[in-house]
Amino acid sequence: MPDRQADIYINMKENLKQPKPYMNPYLAGIVLGFVLLASFYLTGRGLGASGATRSVVIGAVTSVTPEHAENSGYFSKYLGDNQMKTWLVLEIAGVIIGGFLSGAWAGRLKIRVEHSPGISKRKRIYMATLGGLLFGFGSQLGRGCTSGAALTGMSVMSLAGFVTMMAIFGTAFALAYFFRKNWI
Amino acid sequence: MGPLVPLQNISNELNLLIAFVIGLGFGIALEQAGFSSSRKLAGMFYGYDTTVLKVFFTAAITAMLGLIFLNFVGLIDLDIVYVNEYYVYSAIIGGIIMGAGFIIGGFCPGTSFTAAAIGKIDAMWFILGSMIGIFIFGETFVFWKDLYMSGYKGAIKISDVLGIRDGYFALLLILVATLMFWVAEMAEKKFKREDITKEI
C-alpha cells in the first residue's frame, strides 16, 4: 500500500507540473469574437497588430534621423502623433500583458526556442526572423495583417478582408510541402 | 448609440485605456487558444492541428453576427464602423507575401506578441524580423508605390458584390464554416501527430 500511495503522490506532482490544457478552440473563437465586437462597439474599428510594429519602427527612425522620416514617402504619412501613444501600441501592450497573464495562469511560462526535432534551434531562429521579415513587409503592402486585414476585415464583410485571408492561407498551404521539414 | 469613441466625445486618454483593455482580452484569447505555439499554428497547414481555422472563423462569425444584431436593435451605426478599403493588387500580393512569412516563420504579428510574452525566443526574433520587413518596405516605398495604390475599388462589402443582404451572407458563411469545421475535424484524425501535439 505505501508503494501505491507513493505512486499517487508522484503522479500528482507530475500533474502539477503539466500546463493546463488549451481552451476549446470554438469557445476561444467566441471569446475572441466578443473582444473584436467590443472593439467595434467602443471604437468603430477592429483589432490590429502590425500597425503597432510600424509605430515602433517609425518611432525608431524618427529618433535617429527625424528629417529622413519626414522625407520618407511612406513613414511620413504616419508622423505627427507620439508613436508610443497610438491606439494600436496601447492595444499590443495589452496583448503582451494579457498573453503573459494567461500563460502564467496556465503554467506555460518558459524561456525557450520552440522547434521541431528535425531542425536545430539556430535554423528555427533564422526561419522565424525571415518569416517575420516577409510578414512585416507583406502587412504594409496589404494594409494590415491577419488581425487587421483578414479577421477584422472579414467581420465587417469587406471584400478586401476575404481576399487577403484567402491569399495568406492559400499561399501558406501551397508552400507547406516545401517547408515540411521545419514542422513535421 | 455606438461606436462610442467617435460618437460620444470620448477623451483620447480614455480611448487609449480602452485600447489597452481590448488588447488584454485579445492577448488572453490568443494565448488560451494556443496561438503562442508556432507548431500549433503551423499544424493548420499539415492537418494535425486545425485550431487556427476553428478560432479564426468562429471569431469572425461571432463578431459579424454581433454587428448585425447591434445594428438591428439600433445600438451601433454601421456607417461609422470602418470597412477595409480594397486595393486589388496590394491585397493579393501582400497576402501572398504574408502567407510565405506564415509558413516560414510560424507566426503572424499578433500571435508572435503572445508567444514572446510567455518566453518563446523564436517569437522575439519573428518580431525583430517584422520590424526589419516594415523598415525595408518604408525605405523602398518608391518602388512599390504604384502597386500599393493600383486597383482601388473603395470600401466594398462582399455582400454587395454578391448582391445579397448582409444577413444572408452571414448565413452562407456559417454554412461554409460548418462544412470546413467538419473537414478540419476529419483532417485532425487522419493526419494525427501525437508526438507533436503532446509537446505543444
Image (tube, rainbow, N blue to C red):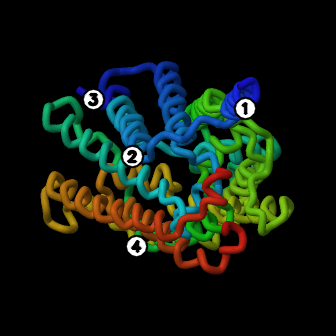
* Residue sitting nearer the eye, B130 or B57: B57
- Judging from the image, what secondary structure is the residue with disc 1 in? helix
> Mark 3, residues whose alpha carbon is within 10 Å: few (<14), some, or many (≥20)?
many
- Judging from the image, what secondary structure is the residue with disc 2 in? helix
Q: Which residue is mark 4?
A: B151
Q: Which residue is mark 1?
A: A7
* Residue B90 appears in the picture as rendered: no
Do dots 4 and 3 share one subunit?
A: yes
**Residue at the image position 76 percent from the left and 29 percent from the top:** A3
Do dots 1 and 4 share one subunit?
A: no
Residue type, mark 3 in image: Gly
Q: Give the x, y percent position of residue B84.
A: 38, 54
Depth-wise, is mark 4 or mark 3 nearer the camera?
3
Chain to which the residue tagged by mark 3 belongs: B
Q: Give the x, y percent position of residue A1.
A: 71, 25
For residue A39, which quarter of the picture?
Answer: top left
* Residue sitting nearer the eye, B157 or B153: B157
> Mark 1, residues whose alpha carbon is within 10 Å: few (<14), some, or many (≥20)?
few
Depth-wise, is mark 1 or mark 2 nearer the camera?
1
* Residue sitting nearer the eye, B11 or A52: A52
Residue A26, which numbered label?
A: 2
Is B120 left or right of B173, judged from the image as shown? right
Depth-wise, is mark 1 or mark 4 nearer the camera?
1
Depth-wise, is mark 2 or mark 3 nearer the camera?
2
